[in-house]
């Protein structure tokens, strides 16, 4: 760092703003050489802060042209200017401040503030981008009403958009035009947005249940209009669902979405003007996979749901980020579960949590759902804040029940609509509505680390009782050596010998009630005694993954196999197979490490064969159940991660299953390989995933027949899901057809940037030994764009995060490559550079040699002059 070590900001240092801003009138004059922003701010002292204090406005990379207070120009001695602030030492109690600044959006490669994407202007203000547009008190508890006038050249930028309602427009001199937008809802500046460009709108309407007619528009670059149907359908479904499930209606007459190619994240919930990464809007069956379709549905819903959870009720400060993100992710998960297969959705969400959040929670960047301090807030848009945050909301839902949770939500909106609040306020609404004490539960906001549960069961045949003993520990994390026990729901059922759920009665209860019970854990050790239990049961624990923990239970392989066949909870039916899989794979890892010969237990092959034999009943579920636990998740289950042994063990198991069950993989693939008309309903998606899973097993031992099937599917299918699945398998194989397939794919899709991203991704995640060389070469491919985040994530990010066996190669070349790329990208786009650092922050989970290799790279990174605070924070914490 050239400016000295950047400072951490602490939650405990929160104080209300010295001043409030009630009104914002912006005039944005977009010109090719420079953009001029005139801001007229209605400011007053904050009654919550006694005494007159200087007004400190945030501002970065702005060229200040003029400042006036109540119309009177201030000379340079009337204010203090620094690289990050404009300070007015002495101002009236209430006044109008007018500033004029110039910026150069065309040079903004960080994609934060006002920037250009494919020639169009757009903005990204969350978290602290508004200060790159104008001087402002850039914090979410300063909420104002905005009026925005945009002026630009009419031919190049025919579409001019901002938040709220269009209240005027017209032509100006020199072929220019203007539009005036007014947003009636007070909002924090992070929800401000502006777009100017040559865009085409796809239009629809939605009538809210109280009769408001809302115009829906999705703006895309010309030529993409035919790829918006799914996003539009998803938007309308989201609007209807939020009315139905939460009673929440849209509150304006316009809802606009703009899709841009250059975007650091997925999308952004700016009031009535959502800005999206094209990846989460554009789709046709030929260009988008089923995963893409589901991703679009989820992200469109997520941003729409933010209108209430985030916008109407927003965050007091950025430590409260999970207030809106955890809650909104939970809501989008519920929505997707309702629209598709709920069981598959839950399985996939848990898989995501385990592959990404669990490793984060045990690494150098581990932080609580409500972090206590940060250097760079952009580093805290994390799986912990989002996905573990969503699990915390899910636990309220489980503890309070669906109705209690809804009452809590109603109370939350009743109390806080129009306010900027905290996670404590949310918890208070839930506690009051549910009539429960959530004091201990709130540890979920302040304690980092994945809790570990150990459960043992004892059956007393004479007394007909079954006793569960549950022990919980929370591991130490950076800055938090000692933890307290957490309050969490352990949803439990007991299966009788016939595989059916037993009615449950706990000691002390008059009568049995239900077959699935919410056991509430609060202590380090707890016992639950079930009475009237006719025979030794097999417990089904943590049903639906009722808490984000690592669970170990004293179940035998036979118990687990029994659960895979019988559990009435589909998540646990899947989970039992995974636990068995983890056991077997970790055993193979140990065998590899000590040079023992490898063998896959017959029982496991048999169990997989049984699932496969029954796959026709529920292809979607079978496709999940037949996937072995992933390499990243297996790593989380080891004291020291051995990425090579994990990969070898898993590949051995896959090859063995491929061989032993070959005829069934073949038959099941055939049964689903007919070209049914394309649809994205859950059943069709399930059939495609099963088919492609079968192909993947066949290609684990790629004989000519398997390769032939892959090639046939690659050339014969029109659905991208099938095409890319086949290409992925070919690209990872030694089949001589591999290069031709890659070349053909590129040739067919070179004009579609999102599809080209897939082509990069397939090559970056190939397990072939020459992958790193190939990735290096692809950096120079004409289609690779270092400034486009999607390209960086598809090639560099996919290699580092999605190809452990090659990234963690013993020679350390993967680490050196990643560090090179981080240092190259950081001066342009610190957020993207910092996101690539994720793997380095897991440093202490690896062996001494790998730690030393990573350390060398991290030291090189921190020693680099002018490093961004984003990368500095991750690198320095990883070195601690
Ligand atoms: N609030 C958005 C995520 C987001 C955050 C930061 C961004 O730029 C730095 C962009 C988007 C969401 O949750 O969808
Ligand atoms: Zn969000």
Image: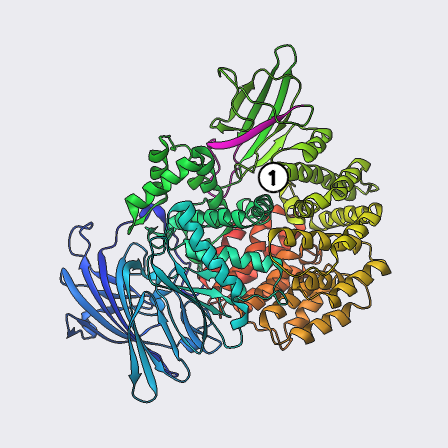
Task: Based on the picture, tell me whether residue 295 belongs to the magenta stretch.
Answer: no
**In which quadrant of the rendered image does the N terminus lie?**
bottom left
Residue 31 location, quadrant: bottom left
As drawn, is 410 to the left or to the right of 669? left
Q: Is residue 486 magenta?
A: yes
Q: Is residue 122 visible?
A: yes
Local crowd size for mark 1, using a 10 Å CA cut-off: few (<14), some (14–19), many (≥20): many
Residue 9 percent location from the top left of the image: 37, 52
Q: Is mark 1 within 8 Å of ligand 2?
A: no
Residue 89 horizontal/vertical position (percent): 19, 63
Q: Is residue 750 above or below residue 451?
A: below
On screen, 800 above or below 25?
Answer: above
Seen at 52% across and 47% down, the residue is 338
Residue at label 1?
571
- For the question of whether residue 384 can be seen, the reply is no
Residue 464 horizontal/vertical position (percent): 62, 13
Name the residue furthest top.
462
> Where residue 451 sits: x, y (%)?
53, 36
In the image, farthest residue toward the bottom: 174
Q: Which residues are magenta?
A: 473-496
């Amino acid at each position: 760092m050239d400016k000295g070590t950047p400072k951490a900001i602490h939650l405990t240092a929160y104080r209300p703003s010295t001043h409030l801003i009630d009104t914002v009138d912006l005039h944005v004059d977009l010109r090719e050489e420079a953009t001029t922003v005139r801001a007229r701010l209605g400011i007053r002292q904050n009654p919550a802060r006694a005494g007159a204090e200087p007004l400190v406005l945030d501002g970065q990379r702005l060229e200040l042209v003029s400042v006036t207070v109540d119309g009177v120009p201030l000379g340079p001695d009337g204010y203090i200017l620094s690289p990050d602030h404009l300070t007015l030492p002495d101002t009236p109690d209430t006044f109008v401040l007018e500033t004029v600044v110039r910026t150069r959006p065309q040079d903004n490669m960080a994609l934060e503030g006002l920037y250009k994407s494919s020639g169009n202007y757009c903005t990204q203000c969350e978290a602290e981008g508004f200060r790159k547009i104008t001087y402002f008190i850039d914090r979410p508890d300063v909420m104002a009403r905005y009026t925005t006038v945009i002026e630009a050249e009419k031919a190049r930028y025919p579409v001019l958009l901002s938040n709220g309602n269009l209240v005027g427009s017209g032509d100006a001199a020199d072929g220019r035009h203007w539009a005036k937008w007014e947003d009636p809802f007070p909002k924090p500046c992070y929800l401000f947005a502006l777009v100017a460009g040559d865009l085409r709108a796809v239009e629809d309407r939605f009538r809210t249940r109280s009769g408001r007619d809302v115009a829906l528009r999705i703006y895309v670059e010309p030529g993409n209009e035919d790829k918006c149907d799914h996003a539009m359908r998803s938007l309308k479904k989201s609007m209807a669902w939020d009315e139905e499930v939460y009673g929440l209606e849209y509150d304006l007459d316009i809802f606009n979405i703009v899709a841009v190619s250059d975007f650091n994240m997925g999308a952004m919930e700016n009031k009535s003007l959502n800005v999206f990464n094209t990846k989460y809007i554009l789709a046709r069956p030929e260009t988008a996979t089923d995963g893409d379709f589901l991703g679009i549905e989820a992200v469109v819903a997520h941003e729409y749901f933010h209108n209430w959870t985030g916008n109407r009720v927003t965050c007091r400060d950025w430590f409260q980020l999970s207030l809106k993100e955890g809650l909104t992710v939970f809501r989008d998960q519920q929505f997707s579960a309702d629209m598709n297969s709920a069981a598959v959705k839950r399985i996939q969400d848990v898989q995501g949590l385990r592959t990404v959040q669990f490793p984060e929670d045990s690494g150098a960047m581990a932080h609580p759902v409500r972090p206590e301090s940060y250097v760079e807030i952009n580093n805290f848009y994390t799986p912990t804040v989002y996905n573990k945050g969503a699990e915390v909301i899910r636990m309220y839902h489980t503890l309070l029940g669906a109705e209690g949770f809804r009452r809590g939500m109603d109370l939350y909106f009743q109390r806080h609509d129009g306010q900027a609040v905290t996670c404590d306020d949310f918890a208070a609404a839930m506690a009051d509505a549910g009539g429960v004490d959530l004091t201990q539960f709130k540890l979920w906001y302040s304690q980092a680390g994945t809790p570990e549960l150990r459960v043992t069961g004892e059956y007393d045949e004479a007394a007909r009782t079954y006793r569960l003993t549950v022990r919980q520990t929370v591991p130490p994390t950076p800055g938090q050596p000692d933890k307290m026990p957490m309050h969490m729901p352990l949803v439990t059922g007991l299966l009788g010998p016939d595989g059916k759920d037993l009615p449950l009665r706990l000691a002390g209860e008059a009568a049995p009630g239900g077959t699935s019970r919410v056991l509430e854990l609060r202590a380090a050790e707890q016992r639950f005694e079930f009475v009237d239990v006719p025979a030794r049961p097999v417990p089904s624990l943590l049903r639906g993954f009722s808490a984000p923990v690592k669970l170990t239970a004293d179940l035998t392989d036979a118990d687990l196999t029994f659960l895979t066949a019988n559990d009435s909870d589909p998540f646990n039916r899947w989970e039992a197979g995974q636990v068995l899989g983890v056991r077997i794979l970790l055993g193979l890892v140990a065998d590899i490490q000590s040079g023992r010969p490898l063998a896959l237990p017959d029982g496991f092959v048999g169990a997989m064969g049984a699932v496969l034999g029954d796959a026709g009943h529920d292809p979607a579920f079978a496709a999940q159940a037949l996937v072995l636990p992933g390499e990243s998740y297996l790593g989380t289950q080891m004291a020291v991660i051995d990425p090579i042994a994990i990969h070898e063990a898993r590949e051995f198991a896959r090859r063995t299953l491929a061989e032993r069950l070959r005829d069934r993989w073949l038959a099941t693939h055939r049964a689903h390989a007919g070209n049914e008309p394309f649809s994205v309903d859950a059943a069709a998606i399930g059939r495609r995933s099963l088919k492609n899973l079968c192909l993947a097993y066949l290609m684990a031992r790629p004989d000519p027949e398997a390769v032939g099937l892959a090639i046939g599917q690659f050339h014969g299918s029109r659905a991208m899901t099938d095409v890319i699945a086949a290409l992925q398998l070919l690209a990872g194989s030694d089949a001589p057809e591999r290069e031709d397939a890659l070349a053909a794919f590129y040739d067919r899709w070179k004009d579609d940037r999102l599809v080209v991203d897939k082509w990069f991704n397939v090559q970056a995640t190939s397990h072939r030994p020459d992958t790193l060389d190939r990735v290096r070469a692809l950096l120079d491919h004409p289609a690779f764009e270092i400034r486009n985040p999607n390209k960086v994530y598809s090639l560099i990010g996919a290699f580092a995060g999605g190809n452990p066996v090659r990234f963690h190669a013993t020679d350390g070349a993967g680490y050196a490559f990643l560090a090179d790329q981080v240092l190259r990208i950081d001066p342009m786009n610190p957020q993207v550079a910092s996101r690539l650092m994720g793997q380095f922050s897991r440093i202490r989970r690896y062996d001494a040699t790998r730690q030393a290799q990573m350390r060398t790279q991290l030291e090189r990174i921190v020693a680099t002059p002018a490093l961004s605070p984003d990368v500095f924070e991750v690198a320095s914490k990883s070195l601690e």
